[in-house]
Image: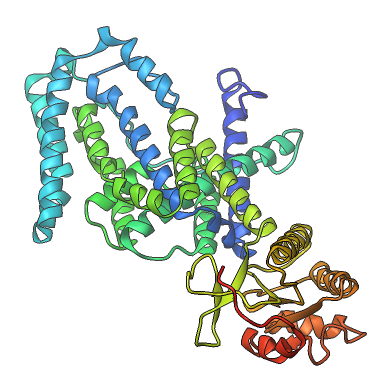
Amino acid sequence: MLREVVSPTKDPILFLQLAFSSTFFAGLFQASLGFLRLGFIIDFLSKATLIGFMAGAAIIVSLQQLKGLLGITNFTKQMAIIPVLSSVFHTINEWSWQTILMGFCFLVFLLLTRHIGMRKPKLFWVSAGAPLLSVIISTLIVFAIKGQNHGISIIGKLHQGLNPPSWNMLHFSGSYLGLVIKTGIVTGILSLTEGIAVGRTFAALKNYQVDGNKEMIAIGLMNMVGSTTSSYVTTGSFSRSAVNHNAGSKTAMSNIVMAVTVMVTLLFLMPLFQYTPNVVLGAIIVTAVIGLIDIPAAFQIWKIDKFDFLVLLCAFFGVIFISVQDGLAIAIGISILKVLMQITRPKTVMLGNIPGTGIYRNVDHYKEAMSVAGFLILSIEAPINFANVTYLKERISRWIQDYEEEGAKKQSGLRVVVLDLSPVSAIDTSGISLFKDLSMALEKKGLEFVLVNPIGEVMEKLQRADETKNLMRPGVLFLTVDEAVGSLSSTVKYQLPEHV
């Protein structure tokens, strides 16, 4: 976003100033969301979304390591699977057999130690220490055989010391302020979404809860502080979190240990990593992320809910074919569409009596449930609001029409429409109007309209809105369906039950 306005090569100082300033505003925006208690936003990251995201990200991260595992020099910076594979096969002449051999050996070693750690929890230290041991051994091997002269890519000489302070480079005024704020907000949203998705992924694996507000505050403050220490926008790393998880870390204390280790390394140990081969780093990351592809969980979602499985596939294919952010956005969009469909198309079912009891259940789920002659008993299994009243009115009218047509064939007419409101947790003024309209329409047809067990908010709003007492008068409002049927049966000519 910044390169569209400022060139990092022609004006590197200004570019850095804008980058640090954008990082500050990204952090400010993220932390503000947390302080304003908007953490509920992360609830749109469903389990299906996370499993698809996790699998897609694991594949993308693994494919990115092919650069190091194959010894490729000119590798694409894109993350999608097609550019990555295209880059791999268009640079076959750069493949190094020495690198491939070393990568294969360490990859097998790491996978073996991981398997041992999983099968025998008491030997967790085997898998936890394997990555560090791999780095030490590979570094010694490369140093001994002068691997850099035989096609093995190494990290090379690194600068020592900590990043210099950059608080004096932050810009809060001037002609670029709008660009800085816009860049900060956009990158802040992307990094926050990805970071929280990573957090919830590992929370699901470890069976703990993620507080969205705290996550937002933590990531935001991290970026605000980072902007004063020469850092750009960052978030929770998927690959490094996977390595941390694979090593057996249990608490946030591991982050403190890691931070201190990185600081000591930057200050004193950088020369020791000069001969560390890139291939072993790639092998460590692949080993860590490969276990995050949860095929049994995906199969379970397929068995339970096909729509959720579609969300999973969208997250998966979106991540591997487009980008991590777009994959998440597509999956979240479809999840929201599902919620909207459930809101605007609430389930309405017909109830029947279980013989010998006063219990009424869905006739489609209980074969023994029998309809009561002259009664159409319906249940609305969702809150009633402006978004679904039109659908509900049409659906209830269709139920009445179908019942009357069926009754005409059997020479038994409809006398009472019973609406069970037990599952309805909320209602608005449009919902109240729906009841009034239904009551008047049915009254013109000579039919009774009764309500059963409106609870909490629904009852309160009915009392406030029913000035004429048409809906709250005796004979219209009942506590149970059985009570309503028992009370009104005397007004119905046909009382013999008919099997549905």
User: Considering only vertical position in the picture, is 461 above or below 142?
Assistant: below
Residue 142 visible in the displayed image: yes
Camera-nearest residue between 351 and 138: 351
Q: Is residue 147 left or right of residue 319?
A: left
Q: In the picture, which quadrant includes the N terminus?
A: top right
Q: Is residue 67 left or right of residue 496?
A: left
Q: Is residue 311 left or right of residue 455?
A: left
User: Residue 136 lies in what quarter of the image?
Assistant: top left
The residue under the point 67% across, 56% down is: 345
Q: Position of residue 5 (x, y in %)?
A: 67, 24
User: Considering only vertical position in the picture, is 324 above or below 152?
Assistant: below
Q: Position of residue 493 (x, y in %)?
A: 74, 83
Camera-nearest residue between 147 and 111: 111
Residue 237 visible in the displayed image: no
Applied colour scheme: rainbow
The residue under the point 61% across, 22% down is: 11
User: Considering only vertical position in the picture, is 253 above or below 118?
Assistant: below
The residue under the point 22% across, 56% down is: 248
Q: In the picture, which quadrant includes the C terminus?
A: bottom right
Across the whole image, how many numbered discs are drawn on residues? 0
User: Residue 36 lies in what quarter of the image?
Assistant: bottom right
